[in-house]
């Protein structure tokens, strides 16, 4: 019940309004103010004010009960949610048009760390939800399943989705074009990278790069073209390479070379991705307009020296630079 109250508050009701509405829909019959107060826990001194507010938002209606007394019935939940959805979408469409008129193209690019699984996944969801053209994804099964609802919605909206699925077993549901990462199994990949790698690239404009180990997670968001280019080209390379190996039928031979060949092992430092992502998460860097070398934000000239993390902003080079 607390979850339902919180969700109704999220769409605009007060706590008392949510409690009164839930009392009405659970009763199955018209209720007077006293009965609503008794069932919902709303104080009797304010219950009629609350019912009046539900009437004003068309979530409840007055009817005549026994003896002509005033009673209340709810708008059915399906109708209420349909109305809220329409009003919300209309409001968002209007806001989007208005913001477009006042938005100026950014001359700086943002890079900032992401701490913890919740923040990492939410930032990935932000990118997937905002995509207009394409999504490039490198994901393990656990994170893929978590992102699947938004991936499905993006595909329905015409967004092109291309995924490297880091598993030897195909997902139960594939959205868009999916290639299995067959050249390493889970244990080999974790040993090599030190984490479950997660990359989400949106419209070749923004990217989230993250690593997860059990319940720990680190990552970085960036719209810096250089970082976006490197991350998205990595996903494209893996898509192409895994597809070529599959078409040639040499995945097993490739795995053998990757895991045992001495020359290849020179370039496979165990845990390298996890270590780099942790460093990104623990440090922020900035570039001065004078293009001085990168320096930790805590030692930036004239800047904050308390060692706290601050978003990285890199200045876009001027034309002719």
Image (cartoon, rainbow, N blue to C red):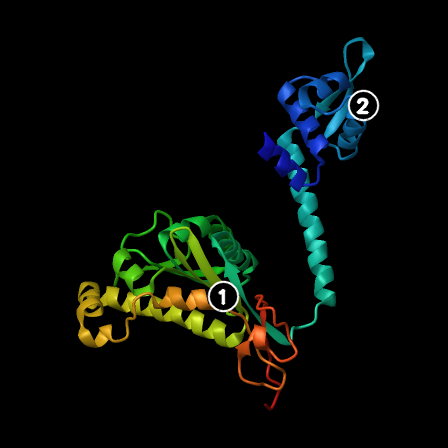
Decide if residue 181 is in sight here.
no
At x 73% / y 28%, what residue is drawn?
Answer: 60
At x 61% / y 72%, what residue is drawn?
Answer: 305
Residue 251 badge: none
Q: Is residue 161 above or below residue 307?
A: above
Residue 169 appears at what percent x and percent y?
A: 28, 52
Decide if residue 3 is in sight here.
yes
Q: Is residue 140 left or right of residue 255?
A: right
Q: Secondary structure at mark 1?
A: helix
Q: Is residue 178 left or right of residue 245?
A: right
Query: Which residue is farthest bottom?
Result: 320
Q: Is residue 62 above or below residue 137?
A: above
Who is closer to the viewer here, 132 or 18? 18
Sequence-first tag of 1 and 2:
2
Q: Secondary structure at mark 2?
A: loop
Mark 1 neighbour density, 10 Å: few (under 14) some (14–19) many (20 or more): some
User: How far is mark 1 from mark 2, CA to CA?
Assistant: 53 Å
Residue bearing mark 2: 45
Who is closer to the viewer here, 289 or 134? 289
């Amino acid at each position: 019940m607390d979850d339902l109250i919180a969700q109704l508050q999220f769409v605009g009701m007060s706590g008392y309004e949510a409690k009164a509405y839930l009392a009405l829909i659970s009763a199955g019959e018209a209720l007077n103010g006293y009965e609503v107060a008794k069932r919902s826990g709303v104080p009797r001194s304010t219950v009629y004010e609350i019912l009046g507010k539900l009437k004003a938002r068309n979530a409840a209606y007055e009817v005549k009960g026994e003896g002509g007394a005033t009673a209340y019935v709810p708008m059915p939940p399906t109708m209420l949610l349909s109305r809220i959805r329409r009003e919300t979408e209309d409001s968002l469409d209007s806001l989007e048009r208005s913001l477009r008129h006042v938005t100026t193209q950014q001359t700086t690019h943002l890079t900032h760390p992401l701490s913890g699984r919740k923040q990492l996944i939410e930032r990935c969801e932000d990118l997937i939800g905002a995509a207009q053209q394409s999504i490039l994804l490198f994901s393990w099964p656990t994170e893929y399943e978590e992102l699947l609802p938004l991936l499905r919605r993006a595909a329905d909206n015409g967004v092109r989705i291309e995924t490297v699925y880091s598993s030897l077993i195909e997902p139960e549901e594939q959205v868009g074009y999916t290639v299995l990462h067959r050249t390493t199994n889970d244990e080999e990949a974790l040993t090599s990278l030190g984490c479950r790698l997660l990359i989400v690239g949106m419209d070749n404009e923004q990217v989230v790069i993250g690593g997860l180990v059990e319940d720990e997670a680190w990552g970085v968001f960036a719209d810096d073209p250089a970082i976006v280019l490197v991350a998205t080209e990595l996903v494209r390379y893996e898509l192409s390479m895994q597809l070529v190996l599959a078409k040639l039928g040499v995945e097993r031979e490739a795995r053998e070379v990757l895991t045992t060949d001495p020359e290849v092992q020179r370039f496979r430092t165990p845990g390298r991705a996890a270590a780099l992502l942790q460093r990104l998460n623990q440090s922020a860097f900035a570039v001065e307009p004078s293009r001085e070398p990168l320096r930790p934000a805590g030692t930036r000239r004239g800047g904050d020296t308390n060692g706290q993390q601050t978003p990285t902003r890199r200045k876009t080079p001027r034309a002719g630079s």
